[in-house]
Amino acid sequence: MSDIIDIADLDVVYLSYDEPQKEEFWVKIKNMIPWAVRVDGVKGSDAAHKAAAEASTTERFVLIDGDNLPNPEFFNLQLEMKTPEYERAVFRWRAVNHINGLMYGNGGLSCWTREFIRNMKTHEASDGSNDTCVEFCFDPLYWSMHDCYSTTYPNGSAFQAWRAGFREGVKMCLDRGRKPTEIEFKDAVHKRNMDHLTIWHNVGLDVENGAWAIAGARQGTSMTMLEDWDYREVQWFDNLAELWSTTQNNDPHEMIEFYGERLTGRLDLPMILLDAKSSKFFKHHYRSNWHNMGATVREIDVVRTQEG
């Protein structure tokens, strides 16, 4: 028989760093989830998650990123632990991205075990392997889930929007954490990642600082694939702050045009920048028929069903 866990019985940790809206969001989250606790300002993705695990008093806990607002109904749901694997796995649910309407794990709610976090060595604590240097997600027990239960707002400032776009512009180019060559690029990058990358490159002018997110995404892809730059620098936020100091005085629209021409010419990427009206239209209709299927339905299981 499957074990059932009420999400309301789990600790909830709000993990913030330098997000411009983190105090405002913390007030909203405490009103929504009175038992939530907060970890703030810990440097390094690996270290911050370990601090979150230490802050939890339950072995399994829910994690909310500093720029995320959950849907309140999520905390009325249950987790069905169907097999022993479920007991040990990390769940990462989708979030709607406020900038471009994408709906995937980036910035979404997650549910970890303290044991998983204590044993992991990723990002700044990585041994340098491709699987762990810039991601958590390649561990076989880190599961992308089908459902969407929150919205992420990574555009509270020009810097935050640029950084969000830049990091995804880098990571969406990679083949399981490995940088492909220019020749390999189109075949090596997973189709879904290529779709996400194209939307980061072209959608978002309808929101505040959206131009910076698009400029950052195009710049991240260009620096990864077309320049002598170590893409692993995205694992450490201080590196991005230093890069921003040399970028922030530029016009984001000029950057969008400059990097767009490079990416079209060298990588044959589609650069069809949507204006504000078109971006809003796209986001309104993108996955407009979406419906959740259950908190413990895995993305891969839905894909396998659809593909027979």
Image (tube, rainbow, N blue to C red):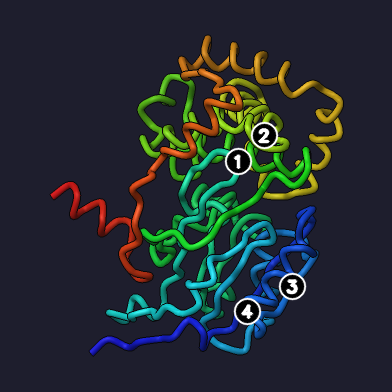
Q: Is mark 2 on a helix, strand or loop?
A: helix
Residue beneath disc 1: 99
Q: In this view, does 185 lie above or below 76?
A: above
Pointer 2 residue: 210
Q: Name the residue under label 3.
A: 39
Q: Are marks 2 and 1 in contact (CB under 8 Å)?
A: yes
Q: Which residue is rendered at x = 41% and y = 38% of the image?
A: 285
- Which tag is nearer the camera, tag 1 or tag 3? 1
Q: In the displayed structure, does residue 161 sit left or right of residue 174?
A: right
Q: What residue type is labelled 3?
A: Val
What crowding class fits label 3: few (fewer than 14 Cα within 10 Å), some (14-19), or many (20 or more)? some
Q: In this view, does 302 lie above or below 200?
A: below
Asked if residue 149 lies left or right of residue 187, the reply is: right
Q: Which amino acid type is shown beneath numbered disc 4? A: Ile
Label 4 to label 3: alpha-carbon separation: 15 Å
Crowd class of label 1 (few under 14; some 14 to 19; many from 20; radius 10 Å): many
